[in-house]
Image (tube, rainbow, N blue to C red):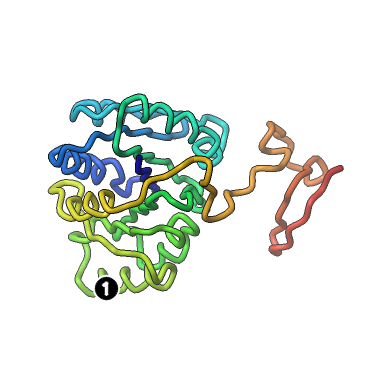
Amino acid sequence: MRMVIVAGTPGSGKTAVLMHTLKSLKARGFNSSVVKIDCLYTDDDKKFEKIGVPTLVGLSMDMCPDHYAIYNIDDMIKWAEKNESDFLIIETAGLCHRCAPYTRNCLGVCVIDATSGPNTPLKVGPFLSTADIAVVTKGDMISQAEREIFRERILEVNPSAKIIEANGLSGQGCMELAEEMIESREVSLENEELRHSAPLAVCTLCVGETRVNKKHHRGILRRIDGFQTYEGE
């Protein structure tokens, strides 16, 4: 079974792009299962189910969506195998811009909004810099010159990325993404590891501390001057 992990900035059009891509895969006779990871709420599962794709929702609540997704990949794969799927597609929330959800053998897809500003690719971290494919959406809303600048910014961050321009409304570019999925390799959980370390989640704030005075905090902490330290036993 092939595994595709789709990350991207909120509102970039991840779900819309996936809807068209899944239709292309289905038309070619492939079965897919989708896991939608979000923080507090999503109804995207209803959209996927309308096109006949089994969908599992995972809400990370107080946990980092990346940590939550990584911790539960084993169960996701078993669920997709039970569905006799050719593809497991995981769409993750990607809220902190430091997300690093891709595993070594998955197909890593970053969906990024071209209207978010020319420097956005420089701000978003490993979910772009370690991706196999960068899907650029909403390019029709900016000029050709702005699109070229945005493309160059992506290549500055990730020179080896394949860039696909897609439209979540018309489906343009989504067939090309489906082709890349079909050509991706199969995964074995026993041999999988992350391409990049996940965001840190080891501090007293993570376990519910609400006091803001620095003296109350322990764990891995970074000061305003950029110095990182560990406080604790």
Q: Position of residue 75 (x, y in %)?
A: 47, 29
Circle 1 residue: 148
Count the labels in the image. 1
Displayed quadrant of residue 209: top right
x 26%, y 73%: residue: 148
The front one of 44 and 146 is 44
Quarter of the image for the C terminus: give it.
top right
The front one of 32 and 109 is 32
Q: Position of residue 163 (x, y in %)?
A: 29, 64
In the image, residue 154 above or below residue 15 = below
Quarter of the image for the N terminus: give it.
top left
The front one of 95 and 213 is 95
In the image, residue 134 above or below residue 58 = below
Horizontal side of residue 166 vs 232, given as left or right: left
Amino acid bearing label 1:
Glu
x 29%, y 56%: residue: 135
Q: Position of residue 144 (x, y in %)?
A: 20, 71
Horizontal side of residue 217 vs 134, given as left or right: right
The front one of 213 and 177 is 177
x 26%, y 43%: residue: 18
Horizontal side of residue 109 vs 166, given as left or right: right
